Amino acid sequence: MSFVTHLECANCGLHYDADLVHNLCSACHRPLWVKYDLEAVRRVLPKPQLSGRPATLWRYMELLPIKDPGKIVSLTETITPLLETRRLGREFGVKHLFVKDESRLPTGSFKARGMALALSKANEFGITKVAAPTAECTTASPRGFTG
């Protein structure tokens, strides 16, 4: 069951039909947000019900824009923990500093969840070819090489 109500431009607020393929806002070329009926989610899906589900991204299926679970494309993106970093927190003067351990994801990056959703939605729409940009990370090595 999907609780998606519509897509909305993150900049100008223009609404779009969530059942149609869109790229960016046609008016201002900004990203679109998925909007939900959160009150309906709250009534139908109590928090304790979530804890008994598998510890993957898909545990939150009702809060994701996928209607057909049979169209999911996944590498079993797991739930990643928040870890308290007391020593680093002390160094920064922060009483409780946490970091999210994304290394447990199949790609080692937080981008795994977004790509799983994007590819699943593309699959749901029948899209068979996609292109995805990425940020190239270059670092200097002690010998001056980059890579």
Image (cartoon, helix red, strand yellow):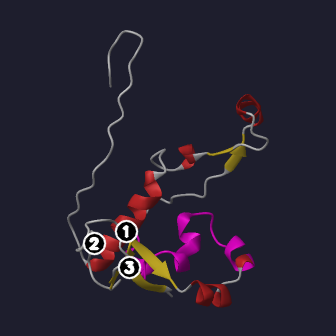
60 up-or-down from 3: above or below:
above
- Asked if labels 2 and 1 touch by Cβ distance under 8 angstroms, the answer is yes
The residues tagged by marks 1 and 2 sit, at their Cα atoms, a distance apart of 9 Å
Between disc 2 and disc 3, the foreground one is: 2
Q: Element type at marker 3?
A: strand
Q: Which residue lies furthest to the front in this view?
A: 12
Q: Which of marks 1 and 2 is nearer the N terminus?
A: 1
Q: Where is residue 48 in the image (x, y as percent from the top left)?
A: 75, 77
Question: What's the mark number on residue 7?
Answer: 3
Q: Name the residue under label 1.
A: 11
| Residue bearing mark 2 | 25
Please state if 80 lies on the left or on the right of 108 as rendered.
Answer: right
Disc 1 residue crowd, few under 14, some 14–19, many 20+, Cα 10 Å: some
Residue 104 in the image: state x and y as whole percent: 56, 47
Q: Give the SS element for disc 1.
A: loop
Quadrant of the image occupied by residue 55: bottom right
- Residue 7 vs residue 135, the one in the foreground: 7
The answer to whether residue 105 of the structure is visible from this angle is yes
Amino acid type of the residue that numbered disc 2 sits on in the rendered structure: Cys
Q: Does the magenta stretch include residue 123?
A: no
Question: Which residue is at a point 49% across and 74% down the rendered structure image?
Answer: 64
Please identify, in this view, whether the residue under mark 1 or under mark 2 is nearer the observer. 1
